[in-house]
Amino acid sequence: MRMMIIVAMFMVMSLYAKELPKSALLEKYLLAAKMYENKGEYKKAIKNFEKIEELHISLPKEFFYRYAINLYHDKRYEKSRTYFTEYITRATRKDKYYKSALKYLILLDDDENKEKKRQKRCKALPDIINTQENFCEDFCEREVYKKIDANLNNYDYTTTEMYNAWYPECMKVCDKKKVQPLYKEFRRKCRSVE
């Protein structure tokens, strides 16, 4: 009896010690990647595609298409373009995903152009904000002096005291109306570019 248990344990251990053949691993990882893709968990799908690449075996055309789609949804546009191009190179016009891959390449062009425009806008926005801040300073300077000139005889305060009282108020109002909305937009649209 004791001998049978030892033999059974040895057989079980040898089953775990055996690794699946690379072709079975390929199918396993492809299945897992598709499963994660369907759930919208693109990062997990990408990890399975990376495992497939580590197998160093001949890959089916579908691998390049599926990997490219997951990279696209994960916003890794450059790498996605590489894999869509590889798929199109290996595929024929009659293949299942050929036209779809071409459409994704068109979308990639659009997305890259949008991203470049966003980055350009985000890099320019601090200059716009600085200009706006200077606008408030200049505007308040003029308005306060106009107010001082108009009220010089009505107050018992010196010009400096009136300036020190009215200028900060003017800046708060100008800042709230003009500058703060620009800062909010900058933070909302440009976090990844800052």
Image (tube, rainbow, N blue to C red):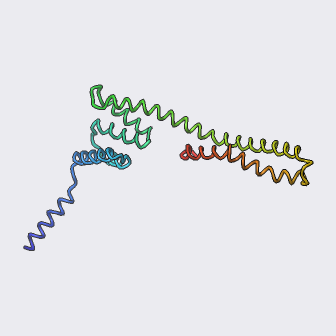
Name, please, the residue furthest toward the front: 154
Residue at left 56%, top 46%? 188
Hey, which residue is sitting farthest bottom in the picture?
Answer: 2
Residue 173 location (% of width, % of height): 72, 47
Relative side of 145 to 118, left or right: right
Q: Nearer the viewer, residue 159 or 120?
A: 159
* Residue lying at the far right of the rendered structure: 153
Residue at x 55%, y 35% (from the top left corner): 117
User: Image quadrant for the N terminus?
Assistant: bottom left
Tell me what residue is drawn at x 37 percent, y 42 percent: 70
Q: Is residue 60 above or below residue 46?
A: above
Q: Position of residue 25 (x, y in %)?
A: 25, 48
Residue 72 as seen in the image, left or right of residue 164: left
Quick one: 145 or 71, which is closer to the camera?
145
Horizontal arrangement in the rendering, residue 30 relative to residue 187 (left or right):
left
Please tell me which residue is depicted at 44% across the width and 38% down the height of the picture.
77
The residue lying furthest to the top in this view is 93
Pinpoint residue 47: horizontal percent, then vertical percent.
35, 49
Compared to residue 71, the image places residue 172 above or below, namely: below
